């Protein structure tokens, strides 16, 4: 695998389910990010991790719970979501948290029913 | 807070033509980066080109070049000899150099570019 990978690519879940999104970066980067991309809206930054420590949480509801067990892996745990949470969730990584470009995974298309 | 504005929701040009996508931004910071990302129908966000604010020379990557006007806070993308594979959403993005802090990218709403055969 190369670059940034995400699984699953598509997910349909009910409002009472619990699921997790997984992201893995094969670039040796130190920072990882979760973004939400909804229709007709700009990408929204959700969480930032630097060397496995969360450094930014952009006022995201607690039904989204991130986890970063090491600098290569990032998870987004989902529970009791709302239909408005349906979106494309993108993971990204960068060499350092404070500068430079970010490289993105292919995203997980989430539908909440 | 930073804002990024892309005023062209959609553009359409013929194959082999040159097209320019516009982007303006607003910031009080002096050290920052600007990027253009491409998102084709496959949804993979791909970095097209980057520009450091301290560099006066405009960045170029093969058929892609930028016109960076720092005083005007403008960052346009020019695509020369456009190809069918250039059809995609193009996002302008901004990132502060935060010197040890943490920041993500601030994105514009995107321009849907269609290359017609």
Image (cartoon, coloured by chain):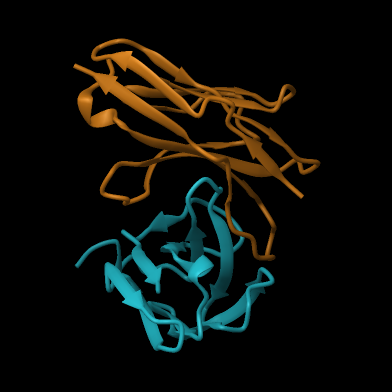
Chain colours: A cyan, B orange
Q: Nearer the viewer, residue B22 or A86?
A: A86
Rendered residue at 38%/68% (across/down): A110
On screen, residue B45 versus residue A38, left or right, reads: left
Residue located farthest toward the right when viewing the structure as drawn:
B28
Q: In which quarter of the image is residue B57?
A: top right
- Front residue of A40/B106: it is A40
Q: Quadrant of residue B102?
A: bottom right
Q: Closer to the camera, B100 or A14?
A: A14
User: Compared with residue B108, is residue B116 higher up or lower down, i.e. above or below?
Assistant: above
> Which residue is drawn at the image coordinates 58% and 67% (left, top)?
A46
Q: Residue A68: give x, y in percent of width and height.
A: 47, 83
Count of labels in the image: 0
Residue at 43%, 79% (x, y): give it.
Answer: A71
B94 up-or-down from A2: above or below:
above
Q: Could you tell me residue A14's position as x and y percent?
A: 39, 81
**x, y (%) of residue A22?**
35, 78
Residue B17 position in % (x across, y down) = 30, 10
Task: Tell whether B39 sits left or right of B67.
Answer: left
**Which quadrant is the C terminus of chain B positioned in?**
top left
Query: Would you say residue A20 is visible in this rendering?
Result: yes
Q: Confirm whether residue B80 shows in the render.
A: no
Would you say A7 lies left or right of A84 here?
Answer: left
Vertical placement of residue B112 versus B71, above or below: below
Vertical relation: A7 (above or below) B63: below
Look at 55% across and 23% down and name the residue there.
B22
């Amino acid at each position: 695998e190369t670059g940034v990978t995400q699984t699953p690519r598509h997910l349909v879940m009910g409002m009472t389910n619990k699921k997790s999104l997984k992201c893995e970066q094969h670039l040796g980067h130190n920072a990882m990010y979760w973004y939400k991309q909804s229709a007709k809206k700009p990408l929204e930054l959700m969480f930032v991790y630097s060397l496995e420590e969360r450094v930014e949480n952009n006022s995201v509801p607690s039904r989204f719970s991130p986890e970063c067990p090491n600098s290569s892996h990032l998870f987004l745990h989902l529970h009791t979501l709302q239909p408005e949470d349906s979106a494309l969730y993108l993971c990204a990584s960068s060499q350092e948290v404070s500068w430079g470009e970010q490289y993105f995974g292919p995203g997980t298309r989430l539908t909440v029913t | 807070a930073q804002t990024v504005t892309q005023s062209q929701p959609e553009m359409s040009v013929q194959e082999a033509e040159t097209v320019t996508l516009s982007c303006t931004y607003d910031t009080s910071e002096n050290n920052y980066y600007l990027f253009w990302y491409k998102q084709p129908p496959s949804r993979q966000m791909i970095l097209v080109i980057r520009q450091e604010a301290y560099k006066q020379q405009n960045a170029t990557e093969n058929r892609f070049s930028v016109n960076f006007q720092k005083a005007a806070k403008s960052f346009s993308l020019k695509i020369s000899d456009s190809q069918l594979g250039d059809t995609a959403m193009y996002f302008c993005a901004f990132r502060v150099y935060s010197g040890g802090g943490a920041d993500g990218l601030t994105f514009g709403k995107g321009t849907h570019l269609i290359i017609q055969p």
